[in-house]
Image (cartoon, rainbow, N blue to C red):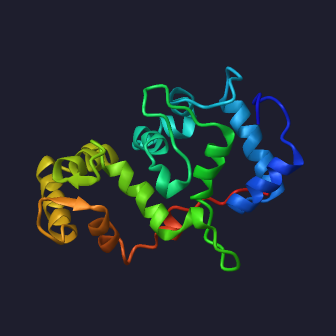
């Protein structure tokens, strides 16, 4: 895409449409949003760019959402992010991540928004130390950021204990991705992790 401020070629739009199932108008709107987030016109977005998004700034899980964008595994999502602190998302990567949040199509299967990929994104938000497991302490940290002072410390402990007991199938004191998937079996993750993109 070169310079972020340049227009996309018809070929690039078609490739992105095939890859993501976004239609032409959605891609153009996403490109416009990408450009508005890329305040410096560098052709990529950094963590800082995402942290300046008002909707994420007020979300108690905003930092976790941003972190999940930058810690996705390339084998699962078809791209690789830099390991250094200067992680960047170009427009194509940005669109591929957002494709995970499309409602699932009954007509055409988009591999980017499968149930498994949606669950992996959610799992990454809880895996604070990025070791592919969720510990009781990590769960408590996320739960506390979501509910804050609305529950007592004792209630928080009880919820963490119950969740670990229910989700930790092999009783190893941590929740693996497989444990997480089993625990979420009856959750309508497709609905909870879908965004309606305007045409």
For the point 57% across and 29% down, the residue is 49
Height in image: 3 above or below 164? above
Residue 164 image-quadrant placement? bottom left
* Residue situated furthest right in the rendering: 10
The x and y percentages for residue 83 are 43, 33
Residue nearer the viewer, 106 or 74: 74
Residue 22 image-quadrant placement? bottom right
Where does the C terminus fall, quadrant-wise? bottom right
For the point 63% across and 68% down, the residue is 110
Height in image: 49 above or below 22? above
For the point 56% across and 53% down, the residue is 78
Answer left or right for 173 relative to 78.
left
Residue nearer the viewer, 104 or 133: 133
For the point 29% across and 47% down, the residue is 142
The x and y percentages for residue 13 are 81, 50
Answer left or right for 30 relative to 126.
right
């Amino acid at each position: 895409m070169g310079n972020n401020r340049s227009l996309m070629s018809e070929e690039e739009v078609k490739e992105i449409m095939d890859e993501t199932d976004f239609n032409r108008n959605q891609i153009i709107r996403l490109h416009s949003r990408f450009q508005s987030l890329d305040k410096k016109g560098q052709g990529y977005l950094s963590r800082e760019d995402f942290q300046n998004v008002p909707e994420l700034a007020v979300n108690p899980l905003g930092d976790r959402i941003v972190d999940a964008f930058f810690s996705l595994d390339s084998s699962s999502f078809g791209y690789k992010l830099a390991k250094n602190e200067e992680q960047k998302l170009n427009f194509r990567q940005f669109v591929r991540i957002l494709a995970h949040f499309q409602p699932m199509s009954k007509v055409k299967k988009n591999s980017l928004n499968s149930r498994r990929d949606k669950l992996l994104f959610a799992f990454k938000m809880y895996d604070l130390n990025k070791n592919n497991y969720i510990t009781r302490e990590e769960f408590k940290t996320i739960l506390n950021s979501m509910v804050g002072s609305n529950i007592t410390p004792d209630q928080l402990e009880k919820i963490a204990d119950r969740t670990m007991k229910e989700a930790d199938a092999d009783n190893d004191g941590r929740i693996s991705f497989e444990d997480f998937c089993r625990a979420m079996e009856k959750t309508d993750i497709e609905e909870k992790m879908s965004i309606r993109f305007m045409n």
